[in-house]
Amino acid sequence: MSRHTGNRDVVEKLQKALQAFLEDHRKAAEQEPEWVKETETMNPDEPGCGCKDCQYAGYLLGSIY
């Protein structure tokens, strides 16, 4: 069951926070040579750095309304 609260301000802030989280994780991962090597076989549409936290955030991004 899903509920719509109609609180657009909160939803927008959550979406922006999730996007910032994913961007931050990707940026940090790009500094790690091992991660860069792993990305050669990684799905380019993988959210963030591809870790479980980024997968959860990617799932929530666009799902919260």
Image (cartoon, grey):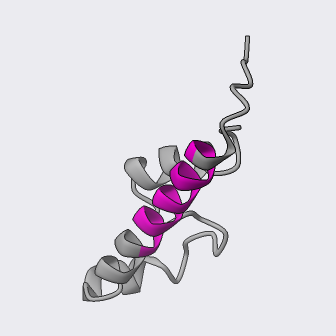
Residue 38: which quarter of the image? bottom left
Q: Which residues are magenta?
A: 10-23
Residue 2 painted magenta? no
Residue 34: which quarter of the image? bottom left
Look at the picture and state if 17 lies above or below 14: below
Q: Camera-side residue: 14 or 21?
A: 14
Residue 18 painted magenta? yes
Q: Quadrant of the C terminus?
A: top right
Look at the picture and state if 45 lies above or below 15: below
Q: Camera-side residue: 16 or 5?
A: 5
Q: Is residue 2 left or right of residue 47?
A: right
Q: Residue at x 49, y 44 (%)?
A: 56
Q: Residue at x 29, y 79 (%)?
A: 28
Q: Residue at x 56, y 44 (%)?
A: 10
Q: Is residue 44 left or right of residue 26?
A: right
Q: Camera-side residue: 57 or 15?
A: 15
Is residue 49 among the parts visible in the rendering?
A: no
Tell me where residue 27 appears, x and y as whole percent.
Answer: 37, 82
Look at the picture and state if 58 lies above or below 60: below
Tell me where residue 60 appears, x and y as whole percent.
Answer: 59, 43
Q: Residue at x 68, y 44 (%)?
A: 8
Q: Quadrant of the N terminus?
A: top right
Looking at the magenta stretch, what is its main secondary structure?
helix
- In the rendered image, the residue lying farthest to the top is 1
Is residue 30 among the parts visible in the rendering?
A: yes
Q: Is residue 6 left or right of residue 20?
A: right
Tell me where residue 57 appears, x and y as whole percent.
Answer: 50, 49
